[in-house]
């Protein structure tokens, strides 16, 4: 049994309705521009909750340069 979530025609499939964990808004996750569209209603909520967007994080990781080893400090001789 499906309970109606509000007024209006029942054109919206409830299976696609998610509640944003950030703002509590009901949204159709397929229309969310967020990377985590099943969790957040939009990029703003994603960025606001995580402090970053997954897109930005992935780009950071991709450009992350691991510092080369070998620049070890020589022991000081006294
Ligand atoms: Zn939201």
Image (cartoon, helix red, strand yellow):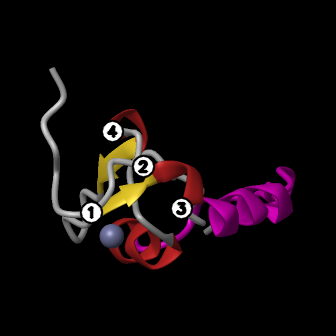
Camera-side residue: 75 or 39? 39
**Considering the numbered disc 2 on the image, is that residue within a helix, a strand or a loop?**
loop
Give the x, y percent position of residue 22: 25, 66
Q: Nearer the viewer, mark 3 or mark 2?
A: 2
- Which numbered marker is on residue 11? 2
Which residue is denoted by mark 4 in the rendering?
Answer: 14
**Considering the numbered disc 4 on the image, is that residue within a helix, a strand or a loop?**
helix
Give the x, y percent position of residue 41: 41, 64
User: In this rendering, would 40 be left or right of 1?
Assistant: right
The local crowd at label 1, few if under 14, some if 14 to 19, many if 20 or more residues have their Cα within 10 Å, is: few
Q: Is residue 74 visible?
A: no
Which residue is denoted by mark 1 in the rendering?
Answer: 8
Q: Which residues are magenta?
A: 51-76
Q: Is residue 64 magenta?
A: yes
Q: CA distance from mark 2 to mark 4?
A: 9 Å
Which residue is denoted by mark 3 in the rendering?
Answer: 32
Which label's residue is closer to the chain start, 3 or 1? 1
Q: Are marks 2 and 1 in contact (CB under 8 Å)?
A: yes
């Amino acid at each position: 049994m499906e309970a109606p979530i509000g007024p209006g025609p029942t054109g919206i499939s409830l299976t696609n309705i998610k509640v944003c964990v950030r703002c509590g808004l009901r949204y159709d996750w397929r229309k969310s521009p967020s990377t985590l569209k099943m969790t957040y209603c939009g990029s703003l909520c994603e960025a606001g909750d995580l402090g970053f967007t997954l897109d930005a994080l992935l780009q950071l990781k991709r450009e992350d340069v691991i510092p080369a080893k070998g620049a070890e400090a020589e022991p000081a001789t006294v």
